[in-house]
Amino acid sequence: MSRARRVAPGTPTAPALRRSLGDLAAATVRMDAMDPVITELVRMQCARHHDCGT
Amino acid sequence: MTAVAAALYAERLGHAPDVAATLDAAWDAAWSSVDPCLLELCRLEIATILRNPAEFESRTPAAIAAGFDDRKVAALASWMRSPMITAAEQACLAFTDAFVIDVASLPDETAAAVREHLGDAGLVDFASALLVLEQRQRLALVWTSLFARAS
């Protein structure tokens, strides 16, 4: 599949969106009811599904 | 988001107020960062794909305040050829379809069409806002499905 750059390097995200999505990710991983290893496995599975390098 | 979905979020995330607060903040940021009328059409398209009739029947206050034309809703079923749907809206709806169905396979030309109308920053904001909308609907559907079956 294609991996062409889709936006110019350094293209900003709207600050409120960037901040809130970052905060959401941080708050999610702080949830402690789920085993951290399972959490990480799920995160990696999501990354694979989304073809994301993280 | 429907009132039912909002109540569901409050109920299911009562033990995690920081997560609930960040979800709410992301929701507000999405509607303040992208044209609310455009985003409303895409939210309804997500509801169609995910078979979420409650979400499809609701309207977002930000979109109503921005003058959302409800006649476009009827045109959504044939958005590729409807004169009610602008070229920019068509590009964003095509992106929405690809994003929801298989984001990893979203074609370059589909992204380029949105960029042509919204610009680079607009494409980034649109994709981020779409993530918020899709995530919210999927989460509500999962909760409804899981807990309805459990009860």
Image (tube, rainbow, N blue to C red):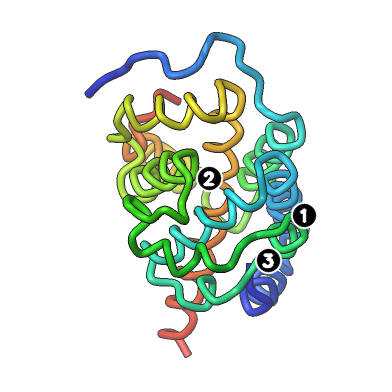
Inter-mark Cα distance, 2 to 3: 19 Å
Where is the N terminus of chain B found, in terms of image quarters?
A: bottom right
Residue underneath mark 2: B131
Taking A44 as reference, is B52 above or below it?
Answer: below
Taking B49 as reference, is B34 above or below it?
Answer: above
Residue underneath mark 1: B21
Which amino acid, mark 3?
A: Leu
Inter-mark Cα distance, 1 to 2: 17 Å
Out of B82 and B17, give the one closest to the viewer: B82
How many numbered marks appear?
3
Of the numbered discs 3 and 1, the one sitting upstream in the chain is: 3
Q: Element under label 1? A: helix
Are both tags, 2 and 3, on one chain? yes
Task: Tell whether B121 sits left or right of B21.
Answer: left
Q: Is residue A37 visible?
A: no
Taking B26 as reference, is B145 above or below it?
Answer: below
Circle nearer the viewer, 2 or 3: 2
Which amino acid, mark 1?
A: Ala
